[in-house]
Image (cartoon, helix red, strand yellow):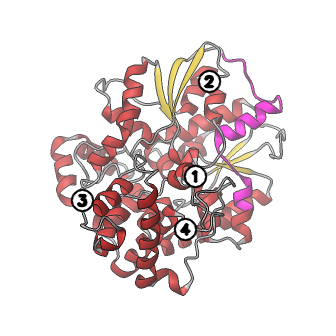
Amino acid sequence: MPREGSLEAPTRHPLDWRSPGFNDPAQLDAELERVFDICHGCRRCFSLCQSFPTLFDLVDATAAGEVQAVDKRAYWQVVDHCYLCDMCFMTKCPYVPPHEWNVDFPHLMLRAKAVRFRDQGASVRDRVLSATDAVGKLASIPVVVEVVNAVNRSTAGRALLATTLGVHREAPVPEYHSDRLSRRAARRSAPGLEPQAAAGTTGKVALFGTCYGEYNLPRLGEDLIAVFEHNRIPVTLVADARCCGMPKLELGDLESVAAGMAHNLPRLAALVEQGFDLTSPIPSCTLMFKQELPLMFPDDPLVAKVRDAFYDPFEYLMLRHTAGLLDTAFPNALGKVAYHVPCHLRVQNLGLKTRDALALVPNTEVEVIERCSGHDGTYGVKEESRAHSVRIAKPVVERVAQGAAAHYASDCPMAGEQIGSGLVERGRGPEHPLALLRAAYGI
């Protein structure tokens, strides 16, 4: 008899995306039916996202009440609601490997997305939203940037985006900056700091700025640099970096992920060879280098080298604190902080390092919110999924609204904007924990 569940730690198998059977539609349908039948019999994940209630409703609507009676064309409704947060694998499913049933729901959804992308391509909207480098470079051109931001702020502009691209009128869209992070970093005078190694780190960091940090929120990279250098950690910006690949991964465009990897990995690995640790201020980007690319390319030595040198920024700071190297003389209190933990940070299994760092600030209370914000890449901005994303975010928004906190923050700036878009009190925007830490230092 199969076991009811496993008490062993989850084991993530590599994504076998180069195998001939990976893209075979018949094999995909058979695996979808097998896993959906297991999920239907369990239903533990019914409240995680919209994929599972969609699946269960499809089953319940059949006369037989079984997965085998569901029209396989309807399976795509389930696939479209999965935004690869990985929370079902990491926190809910009792049948993940090493269980003999070998259920990896997110990887199965990714496989389905990849098969569809290979066979059908993607819509103009999805291609545009996932082309973060190309859009960022164009939208951040001086003069162009003013037009883009004005359109995104106007009612008429949002109506145009909804009509032409299917971007929901009320979904938060990012601002663009012509004064990008790389340009700001090039102007700064880096202090001469001697690296101090701690707990396996080298004590000096190369910052992967991310598309969002480069074009949409350059202040985020500046905040990280300020906090790290205040703690005597030399920081250099990774030059000529491209998108980490997460938007293309979510689309199922695995060849584009591989192309981005081929560009980034030699540059990042060279920095590791020069003695740099690596970090990124966006959890999804960190996750790509620490988990997703290693699962796609398990035998690539450069991928492994970069994975082993990559750190979440607060993970890095708390390693410094453990070694007695973190400055804890904070002149400014933060008061109460409502802190949202993004899914792509939770699945890294680091613990609550951001909370721990903020809690070092005197007269500061950190209320932790471990629920999905519902933004998750492009899911929260699309016309067809915006309402579902708002429903998913509602418990988080209510916690923030009722908490009477002086600040609300998320490690994912897009999740922060999603939360802010649901608050009745719109005058108060989200803040990144790095910005809060910088404010506490008064730097």
Is disc 2 in contact with disc 1, using a CB cutoff of under 8 Å?
no
The residue identified by callout 4 is: 260
Q: Residues within 10 Å of mark 2 (few under 14, many from 20)?
A: few
Q: Amino acid at mark 2?
A: Ile
Element type where label 2 sits in the image: loop
Q: Residues within 10 Å of mark 1 (few under 14, many from 20)?
A: some
Element type where label 4 sits in the image: helix
In this picture, residue 173 sits left or right of residue 166: right
The residue identified by callout 2 is: 443
How far apart, in angstroms, are the residues tagged by discs 3 and 2?
Answer: 41 Å
Q: Residues within 10 Å of mark 3 (few under 14, many from 20)?
A: some
Say if residue 156 shows up in the picture.
yes
Residue 276 pos. (x, y %): 76, 51
- Name the outermost residue toward the bottom: 20
Location of residue 401 with respect to 276 vertically, above or below: above
Element type where label 1 sits in the image: helix
Location of residue 381 with respect to 226 vertically, above or below: below
How far apart, in angstroms, are the residues tagged by discs 4 and 3?
Answer: 25 Å
Q: Amino acid at mark 4?
A: Gly
Q: Amino acid at mark 1?
A: Met
How far apart, in angstroms, are the residues tagged by discs 2 and 4?
Answer: 35 Å
How far apart, in angstroms, are the residues tagged by discs 3 and 1?
Answer: 33 Å
Q: Which image quarter is the C terminus in? A: top right
| Mark 3 vs 1, N-terminal side | 1
Q: Which disc number belongs to residue 90?
A: 1
In this view, the mark in front (3 or 2): 3
Residues shaded magenta: 305-330
Query: What residue do we see at 41% from left, 66% from top?
Result: 251
| Mark 4 vs 3, N-terminal side | 3
Query: What residue do we see at 64% from left, 46% from top?
Result: 349
In this view, the mark in front (1 or 4): 1
In this view, the mark in front (2 or 1): 1
